[in-house]
C-alpha cells in the first residue's frame, strides 16, 4: 500500500483496538464513525483518474516503433498493446496501434493473431492511404498458412478498394497483390497445422469424486478434532497422480509495481494472449476475445472499472479479490449453508454456485490482532460503490437482495467484505505462471505472480513444511499432483509457502502463527534430525555419526555416540579445502582436476556425505569432464552431485528434473562428438542416459503442463537420432 493508504489506516487504528463480537456488528459500529477521511481519500484518487488518451497512445506507439526497429519484438508488442489500451476505441490511434502490432505478430509467425489485429484495424478510422500495406500483410498471412480461398478473397477485396480510392503508388500495390495471388502457396508446416494447445487440462485418472467437486475419486475429505477437515488418500496413490483439477471460484489479477497488469494475460481467464483487446473504458484490462470482455463486464468489471481508472484497487491489496468474492455472493443472495462436517463428508462444493462453501471457510478474524485494516478496506469498497457507482441502487431492486433499505445493506455488505478479506488471508492461493528468463533456456525457469484466487476444494488440504503434493496452474485452474507415493488413509498435505528447505524451524513456526494462526506439527517440525541444517554436519571420528555445525558454538556432541568434540579443528580443515577452490590464474588451468580432487578428498574425511560443501566441487568436476568430452566421468560426478541435491532438496524437486535433462543433453552431445573417452560399454552407458531422461520427465511432469515436457522429449529424441 502507498503512503496515503498507510495514513488512512493509521487514522483509524486507535478506534479499532477491540476486535471481538460478530463481524457484522464490528463493521456496523465502525460505519457509525466519521468516514470523511475515507471519502476524502477516494475524492483524491478520482481527481487523478486515468482515462483514454490519444496523446498518450501516440507516445506508446512511437516507443513501440523504436523497439521494433531494434528487432526487440516482445518489447515492441508490449508498447503497441499499451498504445491500444490508451487509444479512443475505434479511433485513428486505435487503428494505428492495431496495424503496428499486426506487423510484430507477422514477424513472430503468429499469423492468426496478425489476422485478428488486421480485422479489428479495418473496423476503425484507420487512414485510407495506409490500408494497402495492411491488405498486403493480410494476403501474406493467408499465403503463409496455405489458405487459397481466403487469399483470393483478400486480394479481390484489396483490388476493389484500390480501384475506388485515389491512393499513392496505386499501380505498385496492385502489382504486388496480383503477384501474390499467382504465387504458389507455401507448404503447411507442422507448427502451422498442429499447434499444441497450451491450455489443455490433465484428466483425473479414475474420474472425479462425486462427493467432493474438482477432486479425484482416489482421495476423500476426512475429519477429526485435531486436524479438522482435511484430505486423505482413499487408496494408494502413486507419484504424479492428479489429485485436483480445480477452476478458481474467483480470482483477481495482481498488480505489478507500476500499478499495471501483465499485458499478455487475459484479465478474465488468464490465458496467454498476443492480439488482445482492451476494456472500452479503463486502460489496464485486456482480454483474449470479445466473449471474455463481455463476460468480465457483466460479472464484475462494470462495478470495478471506475475504481480501476482511479487506481483504488492497487492500494486496497487483498481487498480487491475480497470484492470479487462479494460479487459472487450477490448472484445467489449470499446463501449460507450452516451444515457441519458430517454434511461436508457427504457432499462438498457446487460447480453452479460455490459461494456458500467458500463462505464457510475459516477466517480466524478474532485471532488476528491486526484485523482493523480489514474493516477499513471494506469501508472503502462500500463507500466507493455507494458514491461512484449505481451498484446499491441496482442491488436493492433485485429479488435476492438480503436487505430492503440502503443503510442496512451498506453495513451488511461491509461486514461480508471484511469477512472475505480475512478468509482470503487464510485460504487463498497465489496463481503463478511459468515464463522464461532467457530465450536460450530449455525450461521455463521463473514463476510470475499473476493473480490471487480462491479454490475452496483444494484449500481443505492442511499444511506441511514438507508437503507430499505439488501445484501448478494452467490459466485460472489449479492442478494438484502427488509429489511422492502416498499410502491409503495417509493425509494429503500442501505447503502454504512455509517450506523447510528455505526456513528453519523457528522461522516456520513464527510464520505459521502470524499468518495462519496455528502451530505446525508436521513431520519436519517435530523431528529436528530431518531439518536440512542437519545435513551440514561433520563426521564423528569414532563412530561416523553426525556432529552438527552450530554457528557461534565451540563444542558439540555426536548425535550417535555422545562424544563431545571441539568444532574448531573441523572448521579449520574445511577452510583449507575451500582454499583449493579459490585458486585462480594459470595454476588452476593447468592443474584443475588435481585441485578439485584434493579438495574432494579432504572434505570426504570430515563432512557428512550430503553436506552442502560437496555440491560445488561435484558440479565443477562434472563441468570439467563436460569440457574435455569424458562422458563416463561426466556421468559419475553428475550422479554424485545429484544424490547430494536429492538429499537436500527432495528427490522430486524441480531442480533435479531440469539438471537431469541438461546433463542428458550434454552427454548425448559428447557421444555425438566422437568416441567417448573411457566408455567401455556404450550400450549399457546409453541405457543409463535413457534412464536419466525418463526420470527427468517424471519429475518435471510434476511442475509443468504436459506440452512443455512433451516438447523437451521431442528435442531429446531428435538429438538421440542424429
Image: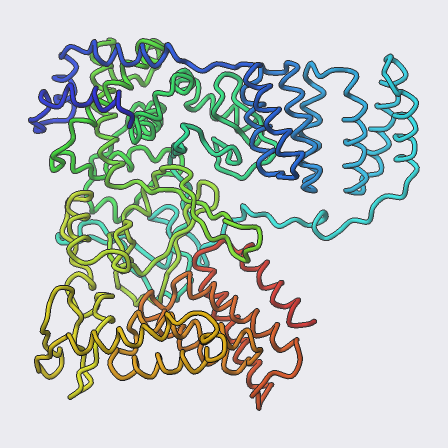
Q: Vertical placement of 271 versus 605: above or below?
A: above
**Where's residue 440, x and y in %?**
57, 54
Tell me if I can see residue 216 in this picture.
Answer: no
Task: Depth check: give the residue in front, 504 or 153.
Answer: 504
Left or right: where 433 falls relative to 626: left
Query: Compared to 221, does 489 lie above or below?
Result: below
Q: Position of residue 134 (x, y in %)?
A: 76, 26
Colour scheme: rainbow
The answer to which of 593 and 625 lies nearer the viewer is 593
Q: Give the quarter of the figure containing the N terminus.
A: top left
Q: For the point 34% across and 66% down, which residue is it?
A: 650
* Viewer-side residue, 359 vs 303: 303
Quadrant of the rendering where the C terminus is positioned: bottom right
Between 569 and 65, the one lying in front of the other is 569
Disc tally is 0
Q: Note whether residue 23 is visible.
A: yes
- Examine the image and state in which quarter residue 656 appears: bottom left
Task: Measuring from the top left, give residue 501's x and y in whole percent.
Answer: 28, 60
In the picture, measured across the screen, residue 349 lies left or right of residue 51, that is left
Report the residue that reaches farthest toward the bottom: 680
The quarter holding residue 100 reads top right
Quarter of the image for residue 275 reads top right
Q: Residue at x 22, y 66 (%)?
A: 533
Residue found 67% across the figure and 40% down from its top: 110
Q: Is residue 510 above or below residue 541?
A: above
Q: Position of residue 291 (x, y in %)?
A: 56, 27
Amino acid at each position: 500500500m502507498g503512503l496515503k493508504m498507510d495514513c488512512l489506516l493509521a487514522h483509524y487504528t486507535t478506534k479499532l483496538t477491540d476486535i471481538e463480537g460478530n463481524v457484522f456488528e464490528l463493521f456496523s459500529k465502525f460505519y457509525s464513525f466519521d468516514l470523511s477521511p475515507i471519502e476524502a481519500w477516494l475524492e483524491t484518487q478520482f481527481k487523478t483518474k486515468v482515462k483514454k488518451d490519444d496523446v498518450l497512445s501516440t507516445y506508446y506507439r512511437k516507443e513501440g516503433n523504436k523497439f521494433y526497429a531494434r528487432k526487440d519484438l516482445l518489447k515492441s508488442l508490449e508498447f503497441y498493446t499499451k498504445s491500444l489500451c490508451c487509444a479512443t476505441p475505434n479511433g485513428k490511434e486505435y487503428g494505428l496501434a492495431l496495424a503496428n502490432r499486426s506487423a510484430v505478430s507477422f514477424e513472430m509467425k503468429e499469423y492468426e493473431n496478425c489476422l485478428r489485429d488486421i480485422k479489428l484495424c479495418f473496423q476503425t478510422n484507420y487512414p485510407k492511404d495506409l490500408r494497402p500495406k495492411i491488405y498486403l500483410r493480410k494476403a501474406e498471412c493467408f499465403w503463409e498458412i496455405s489458405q487459397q480461398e481466403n487469399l483470393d478473397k483478400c486480394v479481390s477485396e484489396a483490388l476493389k478498394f484500390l480501384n475506388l480510392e485515389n491512393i499513392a503508388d496505386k499501380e505498385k500495390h496492385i502489382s504486388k497483390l496480383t503477384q501474390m495471388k499467382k504465387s504458389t502457396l507455401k507448404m503447411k508446416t507442422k507448427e502451422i497445422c498442429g499447434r499444441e494447445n497450451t491450455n489443455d487440462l490433465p484428466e483425473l485418472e479414475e474420474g472425479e469424486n462425486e462427493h467432493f467437486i474438482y477432486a479425484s475419486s482416489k482421495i476423500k475429505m476426512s475429519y477429526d478434532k485435531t486436524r479438522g477437515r482435511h484430505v486423505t488418500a482413499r487408496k494408494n496413490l502413486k507419484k504424479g497422480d492428479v489429485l485436483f483439477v480445480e477452476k478458481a471460484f474467483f480470482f483477481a489479477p495482481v498488480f505489478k509495481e507500476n500499478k499495471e497488469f501483465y499485458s499478455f494475460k487475459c484479465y478474465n481467464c488468464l490465458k496467454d494472449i498476443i492480439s488482445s483487446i482492451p476494456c472500452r473504458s479503463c486502460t489496464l484490462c485486456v482480454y483474449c476475445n470479445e466473449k471474455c470482455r463481455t463476460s468480465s463486464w457483466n460479472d464484475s468489471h462494470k462495478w470495478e472499472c471506475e475504481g480501476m481508472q482511479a487506481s483504488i484497487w492497487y492500494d486496497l491489496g487483498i481487498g480487491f479479490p475480497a470484492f470479487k468474492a462479494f460479487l459472487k455472493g450477490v448472484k445467489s443472495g449470499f446463501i449460507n449453508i450452516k451444515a457441519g462436517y458430517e454434511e461436508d463428508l457427504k457432499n462438498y462444493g457446487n460447480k453452479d454456485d460455490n459461494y456458500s462453501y467458500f463462505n464457510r471457510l475459516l477466517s480466524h478474524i478474532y485471532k488476528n490482532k491486526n484485523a482493523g485494516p480489514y474493516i477499513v478496506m471494506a469501508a472503502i469498497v462500500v463507500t466507493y460503490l455507494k458514491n461512484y457507482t449505481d451498484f446499491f441502487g441496482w442491488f436493492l431492486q433485485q429479488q435476492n437482495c438480503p436487505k430492503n433499505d440502503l443503510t442496512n445493506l451498506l453495513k451488511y455488505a461491509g461486514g461480508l467484505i471484511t469477512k472475505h478479506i480475512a478468509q482470503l488471508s487464510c485460504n487463498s492461493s497465489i496463481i503463478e505462471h511459468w515464463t522464461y528468463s532467457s530465450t536460450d533456456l530449455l525450461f521455463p525457469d521463473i514463476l510470475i505472480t499473476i493473480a490471487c484466487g480462491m479454490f475452496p476444494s483444494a484449500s481443505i488440504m492442511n499444511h506441511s513444511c514438507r508437503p507430499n503434493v505439488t501445484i501448478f496452474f494452467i490459466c485460472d485452474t489449479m492442478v494438484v499432483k502427488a509429489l511422492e507415493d502416498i499410502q491409503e488413509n495417509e493425509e494429503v498435505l500442501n505447503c502454504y509457502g512455509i517450506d523447510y528447505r528455505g526456513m528453519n524451524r523457528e522461522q516456520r513456526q513464527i510464520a505459521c502463527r502470524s499468518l495462519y494462526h496455528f502451530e505446525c506439527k508436521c513431520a519436519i517440525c517435530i523431528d529436528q534430525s530431518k531439518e536440512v541444517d542437519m545435513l551440514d554436519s561433520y563426521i564423528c571420528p569414532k563412530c561416523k555419526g553426525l556432529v552438527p555445525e552450530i554457528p557461534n558454538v565451540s563444542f558439540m556432541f555426536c548425535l550417535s555416540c555422545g562424544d563431545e568434540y571441539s568444532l574448531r579443528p573441523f572448521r579449520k580443515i574445511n577452510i583449507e579445502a575451500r582454499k583449493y577452490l579459490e585458486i585462480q590464474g594459470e595454476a588452476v588451468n593447468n592443474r584443475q582436476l588435481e585441485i578439485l580432487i584434493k579438495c574432494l578428498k579432504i572434505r570426504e574425511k570430515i563432512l557428512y556425505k550430503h553436506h552442502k560443501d560437496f555440491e560445488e566441487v561435484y558440479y565443477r568436476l562434472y563441468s570439467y569432464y563436460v569440457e574435455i568430452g569424458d562422458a563416463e566421468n561426466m556421468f559419475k560426478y553428475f550422479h554424485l552431485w545429484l544424490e547430494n541435491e536429492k538429499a537436500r532438496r527432495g528427490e522430486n524437486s524441480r531442480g533435479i528434473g531440469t539438471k537431469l535433462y541438461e546433463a542428458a543433453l550434454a552427454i548425448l552431445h559428447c557421444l555425438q562428438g566422437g568416441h567417448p573417452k573411457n566408455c567401455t560399454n556404450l550400450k549399457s552407458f546409453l541405457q543409463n542416459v535413457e534412464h536419466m531422461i525418463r526420470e527427468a520427465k517424471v519429475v518435471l511432469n510434476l511442475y509443468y503442463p504436459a506440452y512443455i515436457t512433451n516438447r523437451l522429449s521431442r528435442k531429446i529424441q531428435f538429438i538421440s537420432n542424429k
